Image: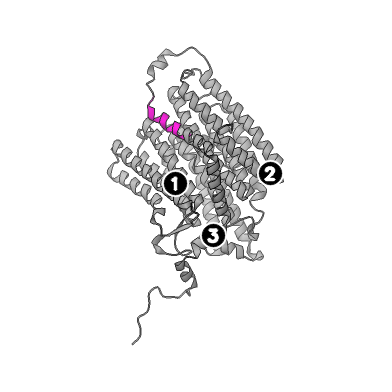
Amino acid sequence: MNHWIIAPILLPSLVAAVIILTARYQIELQRVMSLAATFALLGITTGLLVYSASGVIDVYELGNWPAPFGIVLVLDRLSAIMVTLTALLATVVLLYAIGTGWDRRGHHFHALFQFQLMGIIGAFLTGDAFNLFVFFEVLLIASYGLMIHGGGASRLRAGVQYVMYNLLGSTLFLFALGTIYGATGTLNMADLALRVAELPAEDTAMIRVAAVLLLLVFALKAALIPLHFWLPATYAEAPAPIAALFAVMTKIGAYAIIRVYTLVFGPEVEATAGIVGPWLMPAAIVTLAIGMLGVLGARQFGRLAAFSAIGSMGTLLIAIALFTPQATSAALYYLIHSTLAGAALFLIVDMVRARRMGEDDIIAPRPVIAQNGLIASLYFATAIAVAGMPPLSGFVGKLLVLDATRGHDQAWLIWGAILIMSLVAIVGFARAGSLIFWKVEEPDTRLAAQQTAPAALPFVATGGLIATIVVMTVFAGPVTAFLDATSAQIFDTQAYISAVLETPRAIEAQSLPLDYPSTPKEPQQ
């Protein structure tokens, strides 16, 4: 077994515990430990990404118990991409939080941040449906604390709403897992794929109910219409670095849909055929429309960024709903792009708020940053990326999604929705940018005197995200080639099942009778 697979989960969990026990009241030491752990996490996940590029599917058996009896972590191209993206985003967000002093505004920021990383990465690596639920809960518990970091009535109110919706999702998740276990007797995803495929037609009612419940849970995590109501207030009121990190949390829902509904409940599985496609595509199109119309009509800068996150999830889920290798490859490219661009937009929102002394209204009485060309440049570059305008990767991603829909029965509807909503997004971002950065009014000298020179680190962090988007654009060919191979591996479900279940120990364990002793008996005299 490759023990590096478990390192991205163990590292943040151990560092979080050490921070709580030894550096609770020493913010500088917390920063050093958290930064060192996050940079190490980025190095480890990058190494795992390079390792997975060969096409290997590696399995880590916790406690040396073989699947399906033990807990397993599975590393393939898809999970390697997601954990590397998480580590990259976490590094940038942590630099921004330190540079702006956000980590000083409440207790236990760095410990909660590391626990959050543990939950997110664990969700991407687990090969077991129940442990997907466990890691969901770990990341959600940490996110509850991070959501209300810094205090404030509006933030607390949004945090309560966030907790309520996610508790509902967790309850549905448990119901779904109980139903699945009752119908199949397993929760290991590879073993589940075999058992669901073998179910007789007359015994599929329970598993179909479970498949629908799981889809509702993942749709809630992905902010899919009509389960998106928690996101605008949550993301708009959350501390900016946390909102930027939350950009990858909605992608966990998208990842879970890709993983579960290709491996376990795939389109070719007779027991659950026709459950996902008929309503996922229309819901994704409506999600895209609601998100971009929200961008156009937003009155607060934070809500504009939040609605743009909803709109990007709509585009992403349109590609996922096709469930073809080409569309999945396009979805993965857009997933990476939208995560980076969405996070950059939330960081820029915080820069604008800081320069306007907390003012969040797009039409504000005192637009005091009219002369700040650097923030304006970062905003318009990010707006181009989020709206999908050339030449940045958002344009490439949308072209890939549109190309993947050719030949689909609803291609005309998908093309119309993406193109029209892209135009709406352009108008919405241009309106907000012109009102915030270009509107000329008499300067408020009293307010300007209270402002201090901005720190350089937040600009470096935000610029790093935009630079990564540019790199994705320049190297779109190699990136899409890797994602094509990733998509082919996702749809080669037999390779995943074989890697998890057909290891020598797994074959031996499955061949033993149920009453087989765990230790050899002593020979009788």
Image-based side of 352 in relation to 418, left or right: left
Q: CA distance from mark 2 to mark 3?
A: 28 Å
Q: Main secondary structure of the magenta part?
A: helix
**For mark 1, does the 10 Å Cα neighbourhood hold few (<14), some (14 to 19), or many (20 or more) residues?**
many
Q: Nearer the viewer, residue 20 or 424?
A: 424
Q: CA distance from mark 2 to mark 1?
A: 38 Å
Q: Quadrant of residue 267?
A: bottom right
Tell whether label 3 touches label 2 (CB within 8 Å). no
Amino acid residing under circle 3: Ala
Mark 1 lies on residue: 139
Mark 2 lies on residue: 406
Identify the secondary structure beneath mark 3. helix
Span colored in magenta: 454-465
Q: Quadrant of the C terminus?
A: bottom left
Amino acid residing under circle 1: Leu
Mark 3 lies on residue: 495
Give the image location of residue 444, x and y in percent. Answer: 44, 14
**For mark 2, does the 10 Å Cα neighbourhood hold few (<14), some (14 to 19), or many (20 or more) residues?**
few
Give whichever of discs 3 and 1 has the lower sequence position: 1
The residue shown at (28%, 41%) is: 23
